[in-house]
Image: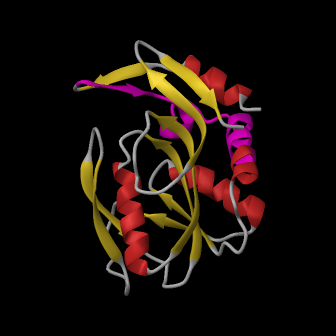
Amino acid sequence: MLDKLVKSLETCPLVKRGEYNYFIHPITDGVPIVDPALLREVCTAMVRMLDLTGVEKIVVVEAMGIHIGSILSTMTDIPMTIMRKREYKLPGEIAVHQTTGYSKGELYLNGVYEGDRVVIIDDVISTGGTMKALLKALEIAGAEVVDVCIAIQRGDPDIGRPYKSLVKIEVTEKVHVVERHL
């Protein structure tokens, strides 16, 4: 399992963002094109890895967590909410600051309430900045984070709690898949 993901990672292009080698991939960027078979493989693997017992909501982060979360929501019949980069000023909206290796800004969470049992899904983790911001927002909301699953793990970021990933990569002059977790 995960053969399509591994092959697509090991052949994807890189670009420099300052000193940061940024890999361009359909799951993390939607570029050049998102192959349905690749997306199905990623989502099927996540369903196998996740603890979905009593989960009431899937929480994803804009933008690239949305396509994975949408498929998972459809597969499991668990509603999804999206942490957005835009403020909506809805009652109960939670704003948190996010800093990653290549960006920073505010993120806004709506639709999660005290006592909600949630799973977090995301496309990639590298610095952990986005995940830390999301975890902070969920803590403010009073939600219980049952599980966290990331498609692609770059390095070993500490987010203050355990998480799962489908694959772990290293990026040098190209992407190397160093671990498969399923």
Query: Which corner quadrant holds the N terminus?
Result: top right
Residue segment shown in magenta: 19-44
**Residue 52 or residue 61, whichever sits in front:** 52
Which quadrant of the view contains residue 147?
Answer: bottom right
Verify whether residue 39 appears in magenta: yes
Query: Which corner quadrant holds the C terminus?
Result: top right
Q: Residue at x 27, y 38 (%)?
A: 102
Q: Is residue 1 above or below residue 104?
A: above
Q: Is residue 67 at least partly visible in the picture?
A: yes
Q: Residue at x 40, y 47 (%)?
A: 158
Residue, far left: 18
Residue, far top: 173
The percent coordinates of residue 36 (x first, y second) are 71, 39
**Residue 124 or residue 51, whichever sits in front:** 51
The percent coordinates of residue 132 (x first, y second) are 37, 57
**In this picture, residue 75 sits left or right of residue 163:** right
Q: Is residue 96 above or below residue 103?
A: below
The percent coordinates of residue 80 (x first, y second) are 59, 67
Q: Is residue 84 at least partly visible in the picture?
A: no
